[in-house]
Image (cartoon, rainbow, N blue to C red):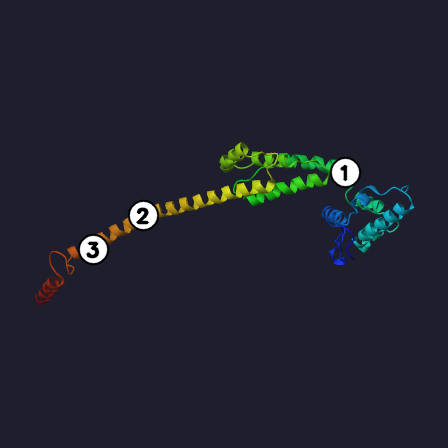
Amino acid sequence: MAANNNTVSVSQSAIPVFNRNNYKFWSIKMKTLFKSQELWDLVENGYPDDDGEAKLRENQKKDNKALFFIQQAVHESIFSKIAGVETVKEAWTTLHMAYQGTSKVVTMKLQTLHPDFETLQMKSGESVQDYLTRAAVVVNQMKYYGEQVTNQTTIEKVLRSLTPKFDHVVAAIKESKDLATYSFDELQGSLQSHEARLNRTNEKSDEKAFQVMEEPSKQQDDSRNATYRRGYHGRGGYRGRGRGVEHDEQIQMTEKQK
């Protein structure tokens, strides 16, 4: 499809296909596609039919283009649900109702997600990356179902729910940053840098502890070796005090002659 004005060309392979799985992700991708073609307003709100003949023809052409995208973006097993509709708004609403649910269903899903958000807590031993990913999943789900979760709300929640080893960096962030403009990516970068420093410190502490544990063992080995050498020399070693090996052999031969 050729580019037109501010729109970009879209190949057939670039259109995501919905096959009853992951409607949420599919609808997000389709929304982005419609926005790239300047069609989202038609999908969401439709178009008036009293703007004059020329404007009406233009709107109908754009609406048919958007409807074509949806028809290409659903599996054959789903196409029957929208085969009879004539506008993209009707097609979009039909799919939305079938696979996301009514406003009552959405409300129920949000009621489940709210406690998940409030009880978010970093686990002992959990990495910053894993925890922030877990938090982002809950926040994005809430946003998908229409909840207005601000960036500041998300950051404040994360800062409250970190493990005690992050207390120092949390205090520094609250003191030096404006949380209203502080981004989630900046927060992640600061926390991961602090985590890396903690890991390096722990590695050095472990290495030092290992060296301390090795030192008594080495001292014991040296002591045993020294004791062995003293005993060997004392019993007549080559450089020891007292009777030597040759003297002992002479005594043994004398005893045999007797």
Q: Secondary structure at mark 3?
A: helix
Locate residue 220, reporting x and y percent: 28, 49
Between the C-alphas of marks 1 and 3, the distance is 86 Å
What amino acid type should be assigned to the residue bearing mark 3?
Arg
First in residue order: circle 1 vs circle 2? 1
Q: Is residue 109 left or right of residue 80?
A: left
Residue 81 seen: no
Give the residue at mark 2.
215
First in residue order: circle 3 vs circle 2? 2
Q: Secondary structure at mark 2?
A: helix
- In the rendered structure, find residue 20 and report the number of the disc placed on it: none
Question: Closer to the camera: disc 3 or disc 2?
Answer: 2
Q: Name the residue rendered at 12%, 62% in the picture.
A: 248
What amino acid type should be assigned to the residue bearing mark 2?
Glu
First in residue order: circle 1 vs circle 3? 1
Give the residue at mark 3.
229
Identify the image quadrant of residue 109.
top right
Question: Quick one: 60 or 250, which is closer to the camera?
Answer: 60
Q: Is residue 185 left or right of residue 89?
A: left
Task: Check if mark 3's residue and mark 2's residue have beta carbons within 8 Å.
Answer: no
Residue placed farthest to the bottom in the image?
257
Give the residue at mark 1.
105
Where's the N terminus, which quadrant?
A: bottom right
Between the C-alphas of marks 3 and 2, the distance is 21 Å
What amino acid type should be assigned to the residue bearing mark 1?
Val
Identify the image quadrant of residue 243.
bottom left
Residue 88 seen: yes
Locate residue 97, reporting x and y percent: 80, 43
Q: Secondary structure at mark 1?
A: helix
Between the C-alphas of marks 1 and 2, the distance is 67 Å
